[in-house]
Image: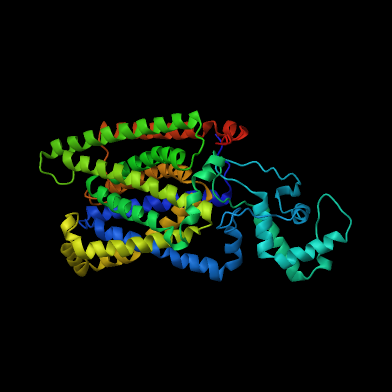
Amino acid sequence: MVCNYSRYTWSILLGMIITGSARSIVVKLAYQSGFKAPLTITLLYLLGQSFSLFVYWIQKYLVSDSYKALSVRKEDESSDQIIHDKRLDEKAVELGTYPGGDSNLDVQCHDDETLLPTKQNEAIMTMHSETAKSLLKSSSSSSSSSSFSPDPASLSTAMYEMYKTARASFTEDEIPNGSNHGLSSQSEARIQWVHCVPFYAKPAIPAVLNLLNSALRWTSLVYIDASVAEMMISGLELTLSVVAARIFRKRMVAKSRWMGVVIVAVGVFIIERANNSKDKQSNSEENNDDSEMHSGTDVTIGVVLIVLQSVLSVLQDIGEEIFMQATDFPATMMLGLEGLYGFCIGLIIYVTVGDRLRIEDIDSTMSILQTNARLRWWVVGLPFLFLITGVFNIKATEVTSAMTRNVWKNLRTVFVWAIALGIFYLGNNSAYGEAWHTPESYFILFGFIVMTTGIIVYYWYKEQEQSEPVLESKPE
């Protein structure tokens, strides 16, 4: 199984898993404490995402050089191909811009990351154009050799330090810029329409989908356990994201991947059935057919909400992938504008018709916040957790793809379930966390193992796929 990610990508994926797990647990604990306010939490979620605009501002204006280096794309907004000067490329090889200083420009892609040698050269010239010119001038007057190393005595200390920094930044760890795995000329033709969309209108489509799917997600946690919801959402989003990638991006999906997706779908079905049986068993033990949280009807509502949320979330993810990777749209700006647009629309709905939706008693929510100081602090801190999670999520889409992001989101379920069980059995209040039910919880565990098997199958033959040429589209 090939998962040869860079350290940068691994850090993004790990952060996405941990912060996403914390997000689900924190919201579920609030519901279990009596603060059932999915509309309010949706607004806080969107508000937290909008804070990403400050992250973008910091990246652009306070860390401008590094930001420009990370924002380089192989195509500009008008989709014109960047023409590289052959002499500069040759000198960049001599300077050791490419890993190992090898003059072979055919760098193999690992997993979903595409390492473009020309991107490295562009970044160095963007960051240190003056330094590069001096180095080229110096190298032209010296004897040619297979590997060039500038003489510190012939350069100023500052220029030499800049050279070392630029070289180290690209030879020690590659920062990928999306996934080209399975893409062909058909894929590029499929998304040419995005270049006709005005810049600040690009986040509008993902923003509407984000508003709807976040409202459905946080409402579903009212009706279903956090661990089960996380398992079902992760499995469904993986299955649907592969289908969406094939339809909307024309990605070539290998048979082994389809097999993995089918196995994941089987695991999701097992989990849903086991969870339904668990809730029926809980109701029979409590002998309370009118139970609000764990009635059969409520569980069905939760499952329907999760299915709808997964569909909208996958459409949002594929939209973000297209806009970020095809039009050079910064990830943190995309997230921030999505949150800002969604928050403005959601606030209007919340104030005008929020009570009529019968999802939340807004007057009761305000009353609880007025009387509970600890909960007010929780409300203040929650948007920042949403911000951190959102940044990791959208960066995962940026450096890999929506499809790969949904693969690794499945690992959140392990953390969510383990923490929920720990809270229930180690805490002093059985109203919080999740209990282990026999035999239903074993079936849920079995379903998760089936999902994990599907993920292994999904990746197992990746090395063989990478060695095969991508099918090019035939001219019509």
* Residue 275 percent coordinates (x, y): 26, 36
Q: Quadrant of the N terminus?
A: top right
Camera-side residue: 35 or 59?
59
User: Residue 318 appears at what percent x and percent y?
Assistant: 44, 47
Is 297 above or below relative to 221? Answer: above
What colouring does the structure picture have?
rainbow
Tell me where residue 365 sits by quadrant.
bottom left
**Relative depth, front residue between 297 and 187:** 187
Relative horizontal placement of residue 474, taking residue 378 as reference (left or right):
right
Give whichever of 462, 126 is nearer the camera: 126
Q: Nearer the viewer, residue 450 or 52?
A: 52
Q: Is residue 302 left or right of residue 17?
A: left
Whether residue 354 sits left or right of residue 465 in the image: it is left
Residue sitting at x 53%, y 40% = 186
Q: Which residue corresponds to the image point at 21% horizontal and 41% vertical from the top-left?
A: 299
Quarter holding the C terminus is: top right
Query: Does 319 sit above or below residue 153?
Result: above
The reply to whether residue 93 is in sight is yes
Q: Quadrant of residue 391?
A: bottom left
> Which x, y percent locates residue 196?
48, 56
x and y, in percent, of residue 385 in the image: 38, 59
User: How many numbered marks appear?
Assistant: 0
Q: Is residue 383 visible?
A: no
Residue at left offset 70%, top offset 49% = 99
Q: Is the residue 375 above or below the residue 25 in the image?
A: below
